[in-house]
Image (spheres, helix red, strand yellow):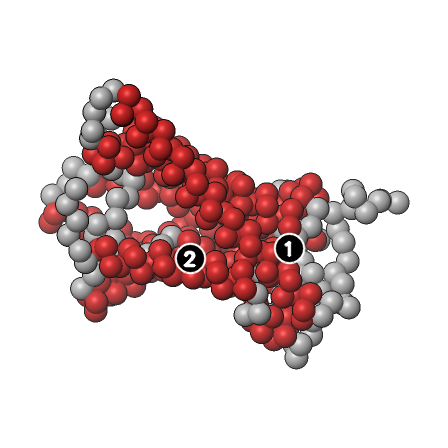
Amino acid sequence: MQTEETNIIETPQNNLSPHDAAKYYNRTGGAICIHYAILYVVQIIAIIFICIAVAMTGSKKYMQIITDPSVMLYLTAASYVIANIAGTIIALAFNGKLKNSLKGMFMRSGFTPAFMALCVPAAMCIQAISIVLQNLFVLITGSSGMENMQMPELMPGNTLNNVVYVLYVGILGPVTEELLFRGAVMKGFNFAGQKFAVIFSALWFALFHGNIMQGIIAFLLGIFFGYLNIKAGSIMPSVILHITNNMTAILLEAVSSSMSDKTLDIFYTVYIIAAIILGGICLFRALSKLKNNPSKENSFFEPECCPDKDSKKKYGLRAAVKSPFLWIAFAIYMLLIISNIIISNINIEI
């Protein structure tokens, strides 16, 4: 007979109240706030050390060094990876036994490599659709909200920068983001059922990116990734697909970097059309298989209670809006998005 400490499969409770759900969401919101606090604390500490090092050399070019693309990449990579891991650990620790949660998160997926290969073009289809939606947004508003944002990118001739870029954007970023959003945050929203958890974790994942352009892709992919994980009984499918998605974007960036504007337009037009058509077929087949695949017995993806359809409202949005820490986290995200939009319309010269 398994003890409480070693038993990963636990029976959801039925005697929990909406107040219990609100407390659960509150702890998740608190973990998100702590995640962002850690993110900026790491960046501030790093900037302080850079300024001290620059001052010791007798130079006064603090801003030039801090805003250097390579330095910004290293700061971004280190701070986000550290904050994502810390946020995951804190959120899981707040809402349950950390050890059991980690075991449940990484239980072996029931999907075959062949099915995962089918999901790769399906994810690319979602990405292509998102790009179309983003372009429509630009046509309507005249702004992408990203014009003056310093985004990490490949730098020809800078080997160290490119290695860090690939490791962060292609591997470490996807892995730690999945741990945080499809792991800890999705678990934190599972009171009202798995659909609620998938949608709201995808929403927070979209807000996390800090701009509308990337947020559209993040939201749509987040829903697909979350649904896939629940059906697989493991976080590994979304980790694999997220890595594949980002590595594909890096490859496209590398291939298109030497193209002329006209050739680049043709290249991306062909890519988007092919991704939507071929990937759409794979997406339809993948969703059909998912529908017929029962969820794995894994308590990590099971709701904390078993509400019926009539009572899900009180465990879902109605309970979530009573969480002050969720509102604080939402305010932080919105301030970041609004500031990016404002900055994108102001010419800043340093």
Give me the residue at 67% from left, 76% from top.
311
Secondary structure type for disc 1: helix
> Which residue in the protein does label 1 denote?
301
Image check: 330 left or right of 337?
Answer: right
Q: Nearer the viewer, residue 300 or 125?
A: 300
Tell me, yes or no, if residue 84 can be seen here.
yes
Secondary structure type for disc 2: helix
Contact (CB < 8 A) between labels 2 and 1? no
- Residue furthest to the bottom in view is 310
Tell me, yes or no, if residue 178 can be seen here.
no
Q: In which image quadrant can residue 143 be found? A: bottom left
- Residue 288: image x %, image y %? 53, 62
Give me the residue at 54% from left, 60% from top.
325
Dot 2 crowding, Cα within 10 Å, few <14, some 14–19, many 20+: some
Q: Is residue 337 above or below residue 316?
A: above
2 or 1: mark nearer the eye: 2
Earlier sequence position, callout 2 versus callout 1: 1
- Residue 22: image x %, image y %? 63, 66
In which quadrant of the rendered image does the C terminus lie? top left
Q: Nearer the viewer, residue 153 or 29?
A: 29
Q: Which mark is residue 332?
A: 2
Image check: 83 left or right of 183?
Answer: left
Q: Amino acid at mark 2?
A: Ile
- Residue 290: image x %, image y %? 56, 58
